[in-house]
């Protein structure tokens, strides 16, 4: 068997782009699996954690529902129900904007801030455990490559 045939057998992809895309999905899934136990202890899904981080970053002004949805890593078609669950747990609070009653602002609560503060160290340690073996130089390069790849993706 020639080297070319051997490579084709090991890499059954139609293109290098297809191989990269599949590897990105597999890596994202593997990292998510490694990260999920940390969130499970706090009884949060990755999507709920993402919303709490968005709201922590928004500060006291909060965010309208649509803006939260636009900033999420994984788009959730039912953001309202997701926010309902977080509100029921006391992790967020919602109220109508005083200047525009059509807008409902969502803010992270003290309890939500406390939950995130308790996760900051274990989340950071998990990220380090999962990725530090790559080294700083390769991690910086990976960030640049991933950002460049996302620039070609149309946003809606």
Image (cartoon, rainbow, N blue to C red):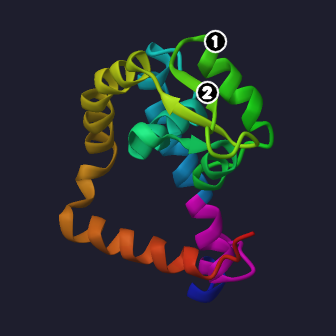
Q: Residue at x 56, y 80 (%)?
A: 151
Is residue 10 something one can see in this rendering? Answer: no
Q: Residue at x 61, y 88 (%)?
A: 4
Mark 1 crowdedness (10 Å alpha carbons): few <14, some 14-19, many ≥20: few
* Residue carrying label 2: 94
Q: Is residue 9 left or right of residue 151?
A: right
Tell me the distance, in whole angstroms, between the alpha carbons under discs 1 and 2: 11 Å
Q: Residue at x 52, y 39 (%)?
A: 50
Please identify the quarter of the rendering in which residue 53 is found: top left
First to last magenta residue range: 7-24
Examine the structure image and report whether residue 9 is included in the region drawn in magenta: yes
When the figure is inspected, residue 121 is found, relative to residue 69, above or below; the finding is above
Circle 1 SS class? helix
Instruction: Give percent across and percent down for residue 64.
Output: 63, 44
Please identify the quarter of the rendering in which residue 109 is found: top left
Of residues 13 and 2, the one drawn nearer to the viewer in this rendering = 13
Q: Residue at x 29, y 25 (%)?
A: 117
Q: Which mark, residue 111? A: none
Instruction: Give percent across and percent down for residue 62.
Output: 50, 40
Of residues 86 and 152, the one drawn nearer to the viewer in this rendering = 86
Q: Which mark, residue 88? A: 1
Examine the structure image and report whether residue 100 is included in the region drawn in magenta: no
Of residues 35 and 77, the one drawn nearer to the viewer in this rendering = 77
- Specify which label sits upstream in the sequence, 1 or 2: 1
Is residue 131 something one can see in this rendering? Answer: yes
Q: Is residue 68 left or right of residue 101?
A: left
When the figure is inspected, residue 145 is found, relative to residue 4, above or below; the finding is above
When the figure is inspected, residue 69 is found, relative to residue 53, above or below; the finding is below
Instruction: Give percent across and percent down for residue 80.
Output: 75, 32
Circle 2 SS class? strand
If the image is split into quadrants, where does the C terminus sit?
A: bottom right
């Amino acid at each position: 068997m020639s080297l070319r045939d051997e490579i084709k057998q090991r890499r059954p992809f139609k293109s290098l782009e297809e191989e990269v895309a599949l590897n990105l999905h597999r890596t994202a899934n593997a990292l998510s699996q490694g990260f999920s136990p940390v969130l499970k202890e706090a009884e949060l899904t990755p999507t709920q954690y993402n919303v709490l981080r968005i709201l922590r970053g928004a500060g006291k002004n909060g965010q309208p529902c649509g803006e939260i949805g636009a900033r999420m890593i994984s788009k959730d078609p039912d953001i309202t129900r997701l926010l309902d669950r977080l509100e029921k747990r006391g992790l967020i609070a919602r109220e109508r904007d005083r200047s525009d009653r059509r807008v409902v602002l969502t803010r992270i609560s003290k309890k939500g801030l406390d939950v995130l503060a308790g996760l900051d160290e274990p989340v950071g340690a998990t990220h380090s455990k999962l990725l530090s073996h790559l080294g700083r130089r390769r991690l910086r390069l990976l960030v640049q490559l991933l950002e460049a790849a996302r620039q070609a993706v149309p946003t809606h």
